[in-house]
């Protein structure tokens, strides 16, 4: 069984002991409801680090007032089991009050890359993410921290944050893990009924369409975007929040695909908002 740690002081002690023994630390922050996507991050961490710490913390500060903080799936027993099977060494599972005690009031705000995509639809989201990840990194002090391309903008934000604030942690991005039919694994997929889940397959289909256009040499990002929108709109249950293409990893506006670009989509199926993305490389087949 992994060691379960709930308090910050003990977490620091466990890491300090590992360091003293000359071990490197890999860190995988999660909000629980673990699935294959999370476990792939763990496997990547295990490949290159001696000790792997997974945090399970549903961070209230990254949810807007009308979002799904209360409804977010909580599956502690299954999560612990998954961590055991994957050979996780330590599970950090703090209470909200441990992370945000009374009189707490310091935020980390990352500029520029947070005012678009999910930052536009969820205005306080990245302030909450940057703040909690800063706190977690300061507590665990890993050599490397692993994040999924599934949340590509989050990776961009966090890489900028550690660079701008001179934080000595490497942020590693791990490719998107999908179900066999292409739906990106997400803790929120449990909200979908079977009709919505079927409809949600249009996300991967639309990304594949974009890759196809890209590979056939289409250089105009507007045309690719329009094709993706048309594909998603052909499914009546799908309500687009955004479909955007930006340069990657800078997230700057681009018209022509003469550099790596992130095609990112956010679409609602009923009340469930799903995100997905792919990296477009001109004349290259690429995954994600
Ligand atoms: P979450 O628990 O949703 O906050 O996700 C924790 C970490 O797992 C984040 O770095 C996510 O990007 C990553 N993740 C979630 N779903 C996937 C997926 N399908 N493939 C790869 N990484 C994922």
Image: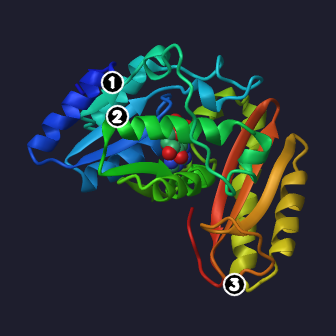
Could you tell which of marks 1 and 3 lies nearer the N-terminus? 1
What is the basis of the colouring in this image?
rainbow
Real-space CA distance between mark 1 and mark 3, rounded to the nearest whole angstrom: 46 Å
Tag 3 secondary structure: loop
**Residue located 57% across and 72% down the image:** 286
| Mark before the other along the chain sequence, 3 or 2 | 2
Q: Using the image as rendered, state which of residue 279 and residue 128 is in the foreground.
A: 128
Q: Residue at x 75, y 66 (%)?
A: 245
47 sits left or right of 193 in the view: left
- Nearer the N terminus, badge 2 or badge 1? 1
Residue 84: tell me if it is visible: no
Q: Are marks 2 and 1 in contact (CB under 8 Å)?
A: yes
**Going by the image, does 63 lie left or right of 48?**
right
Q: Residues within 10 Å of mark 1 (few under 14, many from 20)?
A: some
Residue at the disc numbered 2: 139
- Of residues 76 and 20, the one nearer the viewer is 20
Q: How far apart are marks 2 and 1 (CA)?
A: 7 Å
Residue 71 visible in the displayed image: yes
Give the percent coordinates (x, y) of residue 193.
73, 28
The residue identified by callout 1 is 8
């Amino acid at each position: 069984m992994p060691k379960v740690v709930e308090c910050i002081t003990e977490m620091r002690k466990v890491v300090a002991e590992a360091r003293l023994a000359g071990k490197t630390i890999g860190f995988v922050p999660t909000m629980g409801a673990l699935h294959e996507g999370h476990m792939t991050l763990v496997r990547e961490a295990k490949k290159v680090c001696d000790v792997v710490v997974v945090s399970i913390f549903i961070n209230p500060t990254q949810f807007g007032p009308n979002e799904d903080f209360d409804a977010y799936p909580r599956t502690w027993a299954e999560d612990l089991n998954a961590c055991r099977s994957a050979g996780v060494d330590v599970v950090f599972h703090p209470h909200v009050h441990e992370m945000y005690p009374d009189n707490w009031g310091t935020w980390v705000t990352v500029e520029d890359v947070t005012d678009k995509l999910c930052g536009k639809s969820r205005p306080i989201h990245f302030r909450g993410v940057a703040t909690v990840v800063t706190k977690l990194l300061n507590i665990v002090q890993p050599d490397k921290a692993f994040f999924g391309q599934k949340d590509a903008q989050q990776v961009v934000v966090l890489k900028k944050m550690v660079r701008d604030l001179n934080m000595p942690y490497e942020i590693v991005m791990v490719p998107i893990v999908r179900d066999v039919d292409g739906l990106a694994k997400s803790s929120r997929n449990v909200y979908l009924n079977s009709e919505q889940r079927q409809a949600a397959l249009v996300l991967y289909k639309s990304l594949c369409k974009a890759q196809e256009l890209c590979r056939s040499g289409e250089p105009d990002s507007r045309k690719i975007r329009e094709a993706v929108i048309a594909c998603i709109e052909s499914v009546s249950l799908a309500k687009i929040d955004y479909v955007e293409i930006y340069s990657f990893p800078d997230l700057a506006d681009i018209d022509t695909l003469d550099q790596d670009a992130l095609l990112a989509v956010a679409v609602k199926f009923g009340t469930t908002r799903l995100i997905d993305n792919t990296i477009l490389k001109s004349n290259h087949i690429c995954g994600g």
